[in-house]
Image (cartoon, helix red, strand yellow):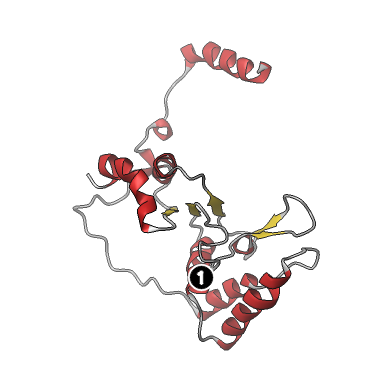
Amino acid sequence: SQFVSGCFDDAYNAAPDYVASDADWYDSPWKDVNTPNQHSPLRDTGVSMDVLEKVGSVLATVPEDFNIHRRLNNMILKAKQKTIDEKKGLDWATAEAMAFGSLLLEGTHVRVSGQDSQRGTFSHRHAVWRDQKVKDLAYTPLNNIDENQALFACVNSPLSEFGVMGFELGYSQEDPNALTIWEAQFGDFVNGAQIIIDQFISR
């Protein structure tokens, strides 16, 4: 509380000399983004096989000192590695991870949130692994592709669609060059967020 009080005092004392900059305005990051009435030129959105192989190389690779769940390793990750090695039969989650990874390598921040987004509602994604012996230790493969990549955030959200969608909408407005995804685990889950959709998204 002393730290918070100090922050408030400092801000109050600095207020008379405050000069606003362009970055302080809500719409400043969006000034160069096309409006809905402007057409964007067609772009090639594909990536090279080298990029896909680089992303794929981390999706089923477990660090030596990480105690991964035995079933996750023996069943899911080994099957994933087989499809990556053979370059065929990739499932939805692997293809999704390839897409996310290619964006991360291009410098695009990717954020996914939802009630069970880390594992995936149907146990398909496994974007974040939990160490089975060390409490609170987690490993995110997509954050280990390249040291110069953007950040991948995959978070489990509380069961409050209204609040979570409102937060993610605000988060998405901070950076026009980031991909922010709110994931409804089932169709009816979006019902709780309908007010946010009606008031702010679909207007």
Residue lying at 30% horizontally and 40% vertically, measured from the top left: 195
* Residue depicted at 49% across the width and 55% down the height: 112
Residue 80 or 75: which is nearer the viewer?
A: 75
Q: Is residue 185 above or below residue 196?
A: below
Q: Which amino acid type is marked by label 1?
A: Ala
In the picture, measured across the screen, residue 101 lies left or right of residue 192, that is right
> In terms of depth relative to the viewer, which is nearer, 52 or 198?
198
Residue 162 position, x and y percent, is 39, 41
The secondary structure type at the circle numbered 1 is helix
Residue 109: image location, x then y, percent: 50, 54
Q: Eyeballing the image, is 101 above or below 27?
A: below
Residue 191 versus residue 143 in the image, above or below: above
Q: Residues within 10 Å of mark 1 (few under 14, many from 20)?
A: some
- Point out the image quarter for the C terminus: top left
Residue 17 picture location, percent across and down: 48, 14
Residue 182 in sight from this viewpoint: yes
Q: Which residue is mark 1?
A: 93
Q: Is residue 31 visible?
A: no
> In the displayed structure, does residue 115 sit left or right of residue 166?
right
Q: Quadrant of residue 50?
A: bottom right
Q: Is residue 150 left or right of residue 39?
A: right
Q: Residue furthest left?
A: 37
Tally of marks: 1
Q: Residue at x 72, y 66 (%)?
A: 69
Q: Quadrant of the N terminus?
A: top right
Where's residue 18, x and y in %?
Answer: 47, 18
Task: Give the residue displayed 54% in from the left and 64% down from the top.
Answer: 105
